[in-house]
Image (cartoon, helix red, strand yellow):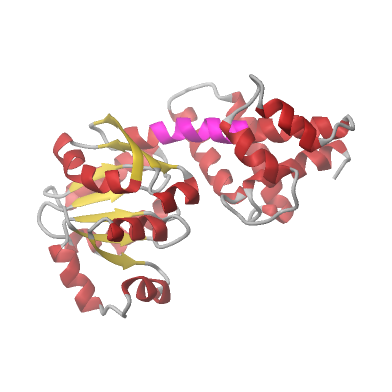
Amino acid sequence: MRNIAFAGLGAMGWPMASQMKAGGFQVLGIDALEQKAQEFNGQAISTEEESRYFASCEALFLMVVNADQVRSLLFEKGVVESLGQGACIVQMSTIAPDDAAAMARDVAAVRPDLRYVDAPVSGGVVGARAGELTIMASGEDDALARCRPAFEVLGKAVYEAGEQPGQGSAMKAVNQLLCGVHIAAAAEALSLAEKNGIDALLMLSMVTGSAASSWMLKDRGPRMIAEPGDVTSAIDIFCKDMGIVCDSAKASKAFTPLAETARQLFVSSSQRGEGQLDDSQLIRTYRLLNGTG
């Protein structure tokens, strides 16, 4: 696999597509914003040129916002029909397991020769820029084997969840459950320290060196007690992701009360107009409830 198209040149997609280009792949960047695609490609690409490229490329990678955008690109814009014989569609956005499975079925109904790989990622913008993402992939063995060289450029670890599209997204949902709950737990703990008059920096120093620590506490904790700054992952992203977690739990009849509570905290923050702040600022909701904000 050498010639690919990469759709979605946002905060995650741009560095991922750039990593693939640096890794020796021929990459055509695609984005809803034509200016962004033109900047990535170094020139404007006409519709005819794009179609010719689709017909010759070996894979289409997608890193867009949600399942609706995936479906729009594949079906409404006709990309499924444009791809060359036997190409792989590698869907790396965070979407619901049921949506991933349905997308694969719909692709197969239109183009049974194409291969659909469900491969969401974890690691955020930092991991994307460093080529150190964790990739959770599911799909047919031959498709996963074809994608592995690209995965090795993008990530530090690849976990093959199974042969059925949707299994990779189910693994990502479990991952996001823990991420969301850990952020909420860190915010709750540090806000409790503040409520009791304990210096937040001192508290953070103590707990990050104890059995109470977590990766999220170490990463988000310093940002929770600092003034809002750069956004690594927005609160609205976790509103979406925790919605996927809770919906997939309901679909499988799983009991996830901690995930439901964390989701409501993120939604509350977003509804107050804080959705574009870094997700570490979930602590502001606790401060508001505690009367310390």
Image label count: 0
Q: Where is residue 141 in the image (x, y as percent from the top left)?
A: 17, 34
Q: In this view, does 163 lie above or below 76?
A: above
Residue placed at 30% from the left, 39% from the top? 101
Location of residue 280 with respect to 175 vertically, above or below: below
Pick the residue in front: 192 or 274. Answer: 192
The single residue placed furthest to the top in the displayed view is 211
Q: Residue at x 35, y 47 (%)?
A: 92
Left or right: 258 as drawn, with respect to 109: right
Residue at 86%, 31% (x, y): give it: 198
Residue 196 place in picture, x, y as percent: 88, 29
Residue 173 counted in the magenta span:
yes
- Vertical arrangement, residue 232 with respect to residue 139, above or below: below
The quarter in which the C terminus is drawn is: top right
Place residue 121 in its image quadrant: top left
Q: From the viewer's perspective, is 229 left or right of 83?
A: right
- Name the chief secondary structure element in magenta: helix
The percent position of residue 220, horizontal first and vertical second, equals: 64, 41
Q: Of 260 and 109, which appears nearest the observer?
A: 260
Q: Whole-percent x and y of residue 69?
A: 40, 57
**Where does the magenta region start and end?**
171-182
Q: Which sits in the foreground, 152 or 60?
A: 152
- Quarter of the rendering containing residue 99: top left
Q: Is residue 53 highlighted in magenta? A: no
The answer to whether 116 appears left or right of 208 in the picture is: left
Q: In this view, does 53 lie to the left or right of 203?
A: left
Residue ID at (64%, 19%): 211
